């Protein structure tokens, strides 16, 4: 019996479970607790109590760590911005404290190759293992982390069969740390042969049908020397490679477009999700966010806790289409889709939105492309940054009620009854705090238009590049009417949770920003401290660097808006949410104002892609500018 599934199943049916002095307390709607469920509750009572206590402890510790916002728990924020759906049994509350993340992780280190002579990397490898263990990460030996794996490689028509025995990293291991290895002539020859076999199999045997990652790995894995060869489930276990620090990648004089090429080639060369560069004095970290963040060696604690652990805990992953309730809309009849196109085109001269790359152009080996294609859910390219336009929030009935009305509302399945309730019309209300005052605000329906994943943000096609995203009690996705829904690249941005979190939090805590709609942008760089003007605020520098595509990143952006709204003494015209090792999100009250400010910042060299200006913001935290 999986206790977490049993508890989630009961919560989805409106059953409330909590622990009072080590006793399991239950409040249930009529006819939900069948005799079978009652029997299971009795049988697994002790395990359920233990599970609920551990879950509550984790949430309480996250809240006490300072990450909660406006009196709203992390669990509730996560369910609000994640579009909590009662049909999702795997929906879990986010963990946003790196030290709590660490306790959930299991990592292994692949043994060093015979004769390995890079003393700098080898020494760092040992220090990294010690530091991970200090933070609570479970580090297990290579022998414990791997298991024997046997399979037969068969090529029909050639009458060729080969029995292969290897070891694979178990799927329960979250990351494998390796060092970069230079392939020998023999390895290169084996890779060439394996790639030829794979292409033949894909074209002739599979007839172009998509293969699973495990099937691809079986066809090419026997020839590989990269650590990816040993990973049983690449969707659950990340490959981390340690190598020499790339001086060009961290060079502030090199353009970000050049850094994109360097970063992508490094990730492809090592076939890993994370590459850590090491020198005698510095540490860099690279993943698909392509941050050029640099840490001094004496900042190893900060590097491990704030940067590496969050990246292992929440890997970059796109939102699956299955998470959305699908529909259609007409872009030409939208008041905001044309504005989004105009916004993108007006920002072309800022240089903040590079075109990105096509997977087919960046990855030469078809087998590698096909593996990446599965991981990124059929996306054909990767771009950096997004543009979006939030529509005015949609309400039904009173936007705010008093404490007496709140007490008469009913509970909402899956949410704490002390934080979220609903009226007879099904409209949900949130108990929160605004400037130290407890208020009861209606949770509005949120809608926004957004650039699709992989599109050219500064030259959007109104008919094909603009999607409409909704957040009610679920996630909704509307594709352009008459568009080809079979197009593999018609997918929402990785940053959907972030966009929705910003729009929702703005409606709740800084409503003047979004009452007439609001443009939102994200770019992979930072403004300098000097760029911020009157009524402009920022927050988030001290947050852990969780990657995009996670609803933890949405939680942090929600928190940021709440903090800005609580601290700003006057009206707000622009709010900037800083994401370490990733970039900046900005929402403004007016499109022309945002365009003017970003253009001026670019021309005056106060905004740049890359991490050049991050330190100026870091030094002034936690008090945002103009507070």
Image: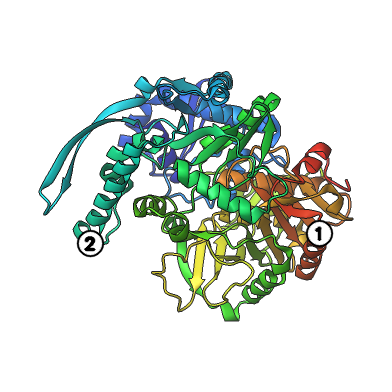
Q: Which residue is mark 2?
A: 207
Tell me what residue is drawn at x 23 percent, y 61 percent.
Answer: 207
Res 418 label: none
Q: Residues within 10 Å of mark 1 (few under 14, many from 20)?
A: some
User: In this picture, is 191 found above or below 181?
Assistant: below
CA gap, disc 1 and disc 2: 52 Å
- Which quadrant holds residue 436? top right
Q: Earlier in the sequence, mark 1 or mark 2?
A: 2
- Which quadrant holds residue 183? top left
Q: Which residue is mark 1?
A: 601
Circles 1 and 2: CB distance less than 8 Å?
no
Tell me what residue is drawn at x 45 percent, y 37 percent.
Answer: 238
Would residue 556 be visible to someone looking at this image? Answer: yes
Tell me what residue is drawn at x 41 percent, y 20 percent.
Answer: 141
Where does the N terminus fall, quadrant-wise? top left
Position of residue 506 in the picture relative to residue 621 (left or right): left
């Amino acid at each position: 019996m999986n206790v977490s599934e049993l508890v989630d199943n009961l919560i989805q049916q409106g059953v409330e479970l909590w622990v009072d002095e080590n006793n399991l307390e239950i409040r249930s709607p009529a006819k939900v607790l069948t005799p079978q469920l009652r029997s299971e509750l009795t049988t697994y009572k002790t395990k359920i109590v233990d599970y609920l206590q551990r879950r509550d402890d984790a949430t309480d510790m996250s809240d006490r760590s300072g990450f909660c916002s406006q009196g709203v728990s992390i669990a509730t924020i996560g369910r609000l911005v994640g579009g909590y759906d009662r049909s999702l049994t795997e929906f879990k509350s986010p963990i946003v404290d790196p030290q709590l993340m660490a306790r959930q992780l299991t990592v292994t280190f692949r043994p060093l190759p015979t004769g390995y002579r890079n003393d700098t990397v080898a020494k760092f490898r040992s220090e990294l293992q010690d530091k991970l263990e200090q933070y609570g990460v479970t580090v297990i030996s290579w022998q414990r982390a791997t298991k024997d794996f046997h399979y037969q490689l068969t090529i029909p028509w050639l009458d060729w069969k080969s029995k292969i025995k290897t070891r694979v990293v178990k799927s329960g291991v979250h990351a494998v740390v390796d060092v970069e290895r230079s392939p020998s002539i023999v390895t290169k020859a084996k890779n060439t042969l394996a790639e030829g076999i794979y292409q033949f199999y894909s074209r002739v045997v599979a007839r172009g049908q998509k293969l699973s990652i495990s099937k691809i790995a079986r066809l090419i894995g026997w020839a590989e020397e990269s650590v990816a060869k040993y990973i049983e489930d690449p969707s659950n276990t990340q490959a981390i490679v340690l190598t020499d620090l790339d001086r060009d990648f961290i060079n502030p004089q090199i353009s970000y477009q050049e850094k994109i090429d360097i970063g992508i080639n490094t990730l492809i060369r090592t076939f890993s999700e994370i590459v850590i560069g090491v020198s005698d004095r510095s540490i860099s970290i690279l993943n698909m966010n392509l941050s050029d963040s640099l840490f001094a060696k004496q900042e190893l604690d900060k590097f491990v806790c704030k940067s590496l652990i969050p990246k292992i805990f929440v890997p970059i992953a796109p939102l699956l289409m299955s998470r959305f309730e699908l529909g259609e809309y007409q872009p030409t009849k939208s008041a905001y889709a044309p504005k989004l196109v105009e916004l993108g085109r007006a920002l072309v001269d800022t240089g903040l939105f590079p075109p990105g790359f096509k997977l087919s152009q960046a990855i030469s080996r078809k087998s590698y492309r096909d593996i990446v294609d599965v991981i990124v859910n059929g996306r054909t390219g990767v771009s950096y940054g997004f543009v979006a336009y939030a529509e005015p929030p949609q309400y039904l009935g009173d936007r705010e009620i008093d404490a007496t009305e709140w007490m008469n509302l009913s509970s909402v399945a899956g949410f704490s009854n002390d934080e979220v309730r609903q009226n007879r019309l099904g409209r949900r209300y949130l108990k929160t705090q605004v400037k130290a005052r407890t208020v009861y605000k209606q949770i509005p329906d949120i809608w926004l238009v957004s650039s699709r994943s992989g599109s050219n943000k500064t030259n959007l096609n109104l008919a094909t590049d603009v999607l409409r995203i909704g957040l009610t009690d679920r996630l909704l996705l509307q594709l352009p009417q008459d568009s080809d829904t079979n197009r593999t690249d018609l997918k929402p941005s990785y940053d959907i949770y972030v966009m929705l979190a910003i729009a929702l939090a703005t409606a709740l805590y800084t409503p003047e920003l979004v009452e007439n709609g609001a443009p939102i942008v994200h770019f992979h760089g930072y403004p300098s401290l000097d760029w911020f003007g009157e009524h402009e605020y920022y927050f988030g520098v001290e947050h852990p660097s969780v990657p995009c595509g996670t609803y933890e990143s949405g939680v942090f952006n929600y928190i940021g808006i709440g903090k800005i709204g609580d601290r700003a003494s006057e009206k707000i015209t622009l709010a900037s949410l800083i994401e370490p090792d990733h970039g900046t999100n900005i929402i403004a009250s007016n499109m022309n104002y945002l365009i003017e400010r970003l253009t001026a910042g670019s021309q005056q060299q106060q905004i740049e892609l890359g991490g050049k200006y991050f330190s100026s913001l870091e030094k002034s935290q936690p008090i945002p500018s103009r507070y």
